[in-house]
Image: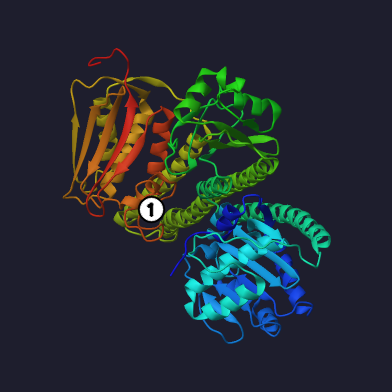
Amino acid sequence: MSILTSVLSDLLKSLPYLRPQLYFKASLTALSHAMEDQVLAATLDQPLLIASFQRERFYRQEAHRYQRLSQRSDQIYVLSAPETDFANSSEYYEKVAFEPEDGLSQEWHLVVIADNYATCLVCRESLGSIAKNQQLPEISPGLDMDTARRFEGIWTSERGVSLKAAQLLLDRIVVYRPDLAGKIQEARQRFGIGEPRSYSGIPALNEYACDIDTDPFVQRLVTYLQASQYKLHKAYRSITAQARKERLVNSISTAIRRSLDPHEVLQVAAQELGQHLGACRCLIYRAQATDAQAMIEHEFLNPGIVSVRGQTWELEGNPLFREIIQQGEGVCVADTLIDYRVTSSPALSLIAKKFAIRSWLMEPVFYQGRLLGIVELHYCRLPPHEWQVGELDLVEAIATQVGAALIQAEAFANLEELNKQLEALDRTRSNLIAITGHELRTPLSTIQVCLESLASEPDMPLELQQVMLSTALSDSERMRKLVQDFLTLSNLESGRVEWHPESLSLQECVDLALSRLRTRSATEDLPQIKAQIAENLPLVRADGDWLVEVLAKLIDNACKFTPPKGEITIKASRNLNQTVEVTVADTGRGIEPHRLEIVFDRFYQEEGALRRTTGGTGLGLAISRQIVNGWGGKIWADSTGKDQGSQFHFTIPIVQGSAGD
């Protein structure tokens, strides 16, 4: 059976003149031990002692004391809620078990009554303390949990109050253990405790003073304990707050060490800071002193709070942001409804109203005097948030960590870019060595052999001499083209080329490029080439020689990778952005999707510099890109994969007012 009402409530109802006091848990422990020691000192003859523990684990800490107390009296009753092995028994003293939902599960009682002595301690744990402890683990309770427990109740040596407290507890014990009725009746008769009645009954009191006056000493002891406990509790709270701050800073520092991704680090910082300070919303975003706007990228939200992620925050007309820039420190708004900086700014007032911001903190993220970003905390509930010094220091510490993270990420990004450039230079060097070795050494060797043969064999047949001369001339032309490509690309990349733009007919430029190709490749079996240029296409504006060079190199590149039975198509169409788009498409080998960008790199060879079958330097597409970029156009490649053909596109600006415009 469970009794849900409180012993303390019943005692205060019976004795309205009593006024409960607040006690810390440590104070109650000291008082309980003092009351028990009075019994153990053997100055009391067969006293009645009733102790109530909220939980069995609290009782287990004191069980050895009650075995000693049982040697002084047979009228000892210990009550507790069972958890593991606590049950009704009469081995050393009377154990009385009550259900966990019983009112006693929230109370702590100790009553000692003797012929010439009486004292009682009747307390109930405060609701705030219970709520806080329910959020903490029950196993191995921490320091903060133990010192935070507070009780309200009565401690007194007034005999009448002690007898009444004993009656209320004995009435309950009879309900829990009816088998003890006879033994309890003996205690009632001996000490003059009221006759048993219904649980809600109120018996008359027998009030008289105790023969032993311990009040002066004990009152001073309690006062001292309470004052000391309060100071200790404040110290523990300060230590706990500092420990939480250190844990928060360490968690963000760990995130910075584990990741060089600034997005991940900033999201962790927003989440940890917002949760720790109980903010409704925590924002972290990048911003510089000269920025007019900022994009909100990282956000922590409490349930039910409107998100601002992805929105643009105005900075140029924001008086809070301006104040940060001028003063170089954070800005705190206790109440947006009355702060003049908010009320005088229509933009800030709108933001505060739209996103229900009642208290507002903006902390700058600086690194060596340079503004990198902003940390914002929003409190959206009533009443306005009261900022504590420790909170502001914590936000400043986190902002410092965030600044270090951003600089670290920026340095890593720069390092990655430098590594990519070094890798590209290394590939260029390797390709240059390979191509130079292959494209220069091979024709030089051939030329040398031909010339040595002509010089050392005067009787060589005329036909063979002609073959030797043709071979030497062909390879020398091959070397000339290689050197010319090197020089052309070098001039284009260094900006030493003079451009001479003019109005041109694209059809004429295509015809010139095809004529040049057929002249150089008269003996080769080329694939079929079709030109599909619209007659009403407007004139384009470019340097004619360089435009023909681009067309020739793209067509030549298509011929190298398209079999003789394949087909090459040259198309041109007008774009909406006042440009003409030229496409050179083939049905040849194609390009794998992941190589579409690198085909324009210098010395790139799809098959590798030393095992290619098509010849060439790998500079044609790189030169084409530099030329197209020179007149402000774009060039790119498309292909669905290997053996699926490829398309190379580039754009040329249109001459304004030309035919078809």
The residue sitting at 61% across, 73% down in the picture is: 188
SS label for mark 1: loop
Camera-side residue of 643 and 500: 643
Label 1 environment density (alpha carbons within 10 Å; few <14, some 14–19, many ≥20): many
Left or right, residue 486 beside residue 153: left
Q: How is the image coloured?
A: rainbow
Q: Residue furthest top?
A: 657
Report x, y in % for residue 412.
Answer: 58, 49
The image shows residue 9, relative to residue 138, as above or below, that is above
Toward which corner of the image does residue 359 lie, by quadrant? top right
Most foreground residue, 554 or 299:
299
Q: Position of residue 197 (x, y in %)?
A: 50, 66
The residue tagged 1 is: 605
Which quadrant: the N terminus? bottom left
Q: Residue 256: in sight, yes or no?
A: no
16 or 329, which is in the foreground?
Answer: 16
In the rendered image, the residue lying farthest to the bottom is 91
Question: Residue 117: in sight, yes or no?
Answer: yes
- The residue type indicated by label 1 comes to Gln
- Quarter holding the C terminus is top left
Residue 543's quadrant in the figure? Answer: top left
Q: Residue at x 66, y 60 (%)?
A: 161
